[in-house]
Amino acid sequence: MFDFAIAGVQAPVFLLALVGLTVGIVGGFIGVGGGYMVTPALIVFGFPGYMASGIDMTHICGKGLVSTVRHRQLGNIDWTLALTMIAGTMLGVELGVRLLVYFKHLGISGVVLLVTSVALMFTLFLYTQVETRRAHKKMEEMEREGKELGRELQTSNLPKYFQIIPLAPIIRCRSARVIVSMWVIVLVGMVTGVLAGFLGVGGGFIRVPALVYVVGASTHIAVGTDLVEIVVSGAYGALRHSIEGNVDMMAVLFMISGAMIGAQVGSIATSYVRGPAIRYILSYSLILATLGAALRLVYVLTGQSVHWLSLAAVVLTLGEMIFLCLFISSLVWFAVRRRGGKWVPEWVGPLVI
């Protein structure tokens, strides 16, 4: 146990570094900061809700920078899309931090963070899981028919409705291969920025689905482009949280020590899979994080008196990240086997490159 003087708590250093490593792998793979998993975990480790939010936001900035550099090398970033979102992201983060400060003064920041997390993550899980299963089934049919599979396939019709909104200026995002109103992109940035500032996350768990299902970008481009936004929102959010006294830099350093390695591994793994595989991992991360947040919510609402709930939440949090890392590793392993002409399970074939 390490005594974090600024936060006023004692927490296990090894678990902080392990959380950083595993979330780095998952975050680099699905394009999220991982705060929807980390912030609730920090609350269970004993950090106050506002301090957990600030610590995670600061660590996300450093980890996101490493992932962004790697995804740029892989060609997964649309800079027009990323830079257009920045204005909305900055405004949203400021509004989100102010909202968190309001609940901090009321003394209910932990409860509000957990309730919001549970509701939002479960909704996103349902939509992403249903759409990805449809896309996976269609890819299996195409493969049986001998048709060539591309890097991406999605079945949602939502992007068509947003792409025909005639509000000028209309911009062309060449890497993402979409033409859409600038205001749609700015709105996506602002909404996810509010969540980033309030929940202490990079906003990726809602921005990646929004880029895919609202803007119409491919999953790989959504992942890389979102990481650019995570760096921006993370840097600004870290500054604002530091001003408010919500950051313990020692805790941040322990988490980043693992995250720097994990971010590289996760980013490289995206080159071995197709879009639906990334969305599967995203949806599974959302439902597992929802269960963990729900346990923490019950633990907080019972006055932190039911100690097995705290233990279950910690075990589930670490378990979900290890599970996702193993899932990602398995997909990469199957991709390597398939490239070598070896057998892989039938359901895996359409998901890997």
Image: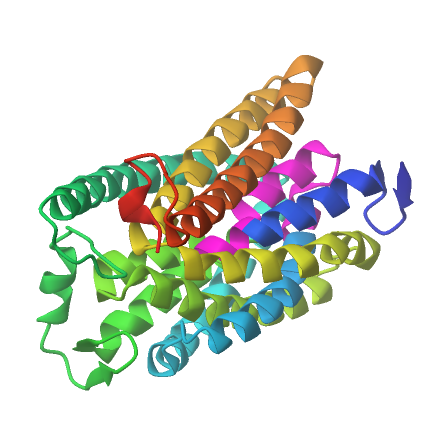
Residue 330 placement, left or right of 82: right
177 to 275, vertically: above or below: below
* Front-lying residue, 84 or 315: 315
Give the mark count.
0
**The N terminus lies in which quarter of the figure?**
top right
* Front-lying residue, 263 or 235: 263
164 to 267, vertically: above or below: below
| Residue 317 picture quarter | top right
User: Is residue 52 in the magenta section?
Assistant: yes
Q: Secondary structure of the magenta portion, mostly?
A: helix
User: Is residue 294 in the magenta section?
Assistant: no
State the colouring used for the structure image: rainbow
231 to 315, vertically: above or below: below
| Residue 171 x, y percent position in the rendering | 21, 84
| Residue 148 x, y percent position in the rendering | 16, 58
| Residue 67 picture quarter | bottom right
**The C terminus lies in which quarter of the figure?**
bottom left
Q: Residue at x 15, y 50 (%)?
A: 155
211 to 72, vertically: above or below: above
Q: Is residue 99 visible?
A: no
Instruction: State the extent of the magenta-drawn residues as a range.
Output: 26-54
Q: Residue at x 19, y 77 (%)?
A: 181
Residue 83 placement, left or right of 11: left
Residue 218 placement, left or right of 158: right
* Front-lying residue, 140 or 206: 140
| Residue 129 x, y percent position in the rendering | 29, 38
Residue furthest out toward the front: 341
Q: Is residue 43 visible?
A: yes
| Residue 199 x, y percent position in the rendering | 53, 50
Residue 268 placement, left or right of 335: right
Q: Residue at x 60, y 30 (%)?
A: 319
Q: Residue at x 82, y 37 (%)?
A: 12
